[in-house]
Image (tube, grey):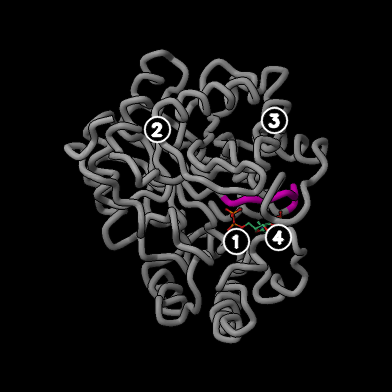
Amino acid sequence: MATVKRIKLGSQGLEVSAQGLGCMGMSAFYGPPKPDQDMIALIYHAVNAGVTFLDTSDVYGPHTNEILLGKALKGGMREKVELATKFGISLVDGKREIKGDPAYVRAACEASLKRLDIDCIDLYYQHRIDTRLPIEVTMGELKKLVEEGKIKYIGLSEASASTIRRAHAVHPVTAVQLEWSLWSRDVEKEIIPTCRELGIGIVAYSPLGRGFFSSGPKLAENLSNEDFRKYLPRFQAENLVQNKNIFERVCEMAARKQCTTSQLALAWVHHQGNDVCPIPGTTKIENLKQNIGALSVKLTPEEMAELEAVASADAVKGDRYASMVGTWENSDTPPLSSWNA
Ligand code: ATR
C-alpha cells in the first residue's frame, strides 16, 4: 500500500497525515450506525496504513462517535494519532442550537475528554460559529483551555474570512475546516487566501461530495430515511438531472487516468497544496485503501483545469445544505465593543 506523507497544519507545530479519516458516517447522519467492532477494525487499519488524523465531533451521534473513538484509542493507539474533535452544535432531543459561550465551551471540552477517555485533545474546533456573541469571547475560553493543557491546537469550522481573522488575533488558529471539493468551491474566493495569509492549515471535509463523486446519482436512490443526504438540495431528483452530467464527465476522466472517480476527486483536493488535508469519510476498509491510493494520482495543470471546467459553479445545481444557518456564509459575529456580558 502507498505510504501516506505527513504535512504541517498551521504554524504552531501540528503535523498530520496528508489525508485524514472522517469518522462521522460511522455513527450518524449517513444511515444507521455501523457496528463498533467493524469501525474499530477500520480505524486500526487506517492508523497502521498511516492515516493517523482522525476527525470526530461531539454532535456525531450525538456523543456516540466520540465514545467509539475512545474505545478505538485504547491499547497504545492514542499516541499514534492526531485526534480532532469539535464543539458548538448542541443537539438535545432533536433540538439543534449553536453555542459558543465560555461556560458551554468548557463543559463541552470536559465532556469530550471524558468520552474519548484522553487527557488532551490535539485539535479542538468550534464546529459552527455562535453568531450571538463576538468570536473573541469564544476564543478567549479556547485560549484558556490551551493554557490548561486540555487542548493542544485550536480550529474553526465553517467560519468566514472575517471571523477567522478576528479569532486569530486572540490566539493563533491552527486549522480551518470547510467543505471543499470539486462541487463546493466558493471557499476559494476569500477564505482560502485568508488562511494562507495567516499561516492557517486547511482541512477539507466532504471532499467526495458526500459520496457523489464515488457513486454518482445512484447514491440518492438507496438512501434510508436516517440518511441526511436524502434531504440535501444537491441530491434531489430535480437537481440530479443536471448534477449527473458532472459525474459522468468525471467518470470519463477517471477512466482515462486509470483511477477511480473517488481517487480523481480526492487527487484534485490533494493538488491544492501541502497546507490542505482532505478527510474523506468511509466505513469500509476497501474504500479507505482506495482513498489512500489517491495520494499517488498525479494531475497536470491541464487536467486540473479540465476537472474544474466540468464541475464549474454554473454546472452544480443546489445548495450545500437545506438550511444555510450556521454555515460560513452566515458566520460573522457582533463586534467585541457591543459585548458587555
Ligand atoms: P463526509 O466528509 O461528509 O463523510 P465524503 O468524504 O465526501 O463526505 O464522502 C463520504 C461518502 O463517500 C460515504 O458515504 C462513503 O461511503 P462508505 O462508508 O460506504 O465508504 C463514500 N466513500 C468514501 N470513499 C469511497 C470510495 N473510495 N468508494 C466509494 N465510496 C466511498
Q: Nearer the viewer, residue 91 or 18?
A: 91
**Circle 1 residue:** 210
| Amino acid type indicated by mark 2 | Asp
Identify residue for label 4.
Answer: 227
Which sits earlier in the primary sequence, circle 4 or circle 3? 3
Mark 1: few/some/many CA within 10 Å (<14, 14-19, 20+) = many
Label 2 neighbour load within 10 Å: few <14, some 14-19, many 20+: some
SS state under label 1: helix
Amino acid type, callout 3: Ile
Residue 325, x across and y down, in percent: 44, 58
Residue at point 32% right, 35% down?
173
Give me the residue at 47% from left, 51% from top.
Answer: 204
Dot placed on the residue nearer the N-terminal end, 1 or 3:
3
> In this view of the protein, which residue sits in the foreground, 272 or 38?
38
> Nearer the N terminus, badge 3 or badge 2?
3
Q: How far is the residue under mark 1 from the one under mark 3?
A: 23 Å
**Ligand 1 quarter of the rendering:** bottom right
- Report the side of 218 relative to 240 (left or right): right
Q: CA distance from mark 3 to mark 2?
A: 24 Å
Residue 55 sits in which quadrant?
A: top right
Q: Which residues, given as a range, are shown in magenta?
A: 280-286
Mark 1–mark 4 Cα distance, whole angstroms, equals 11 Å
Name the residue carrying label 3. Answer: 67
The amino acid type, in three-letter code, at marker 1 is Arg
Mark in the foreground, 1 or 4: 4
> Which residue was labeled with disc 2?
101
- Residue 194 vertical placement versus 226 (above, below): above
Find residue 143 and report its horizontal and vertical position in percent. Answer: 34, 23
Assign a secondary structure to mark 4: loop
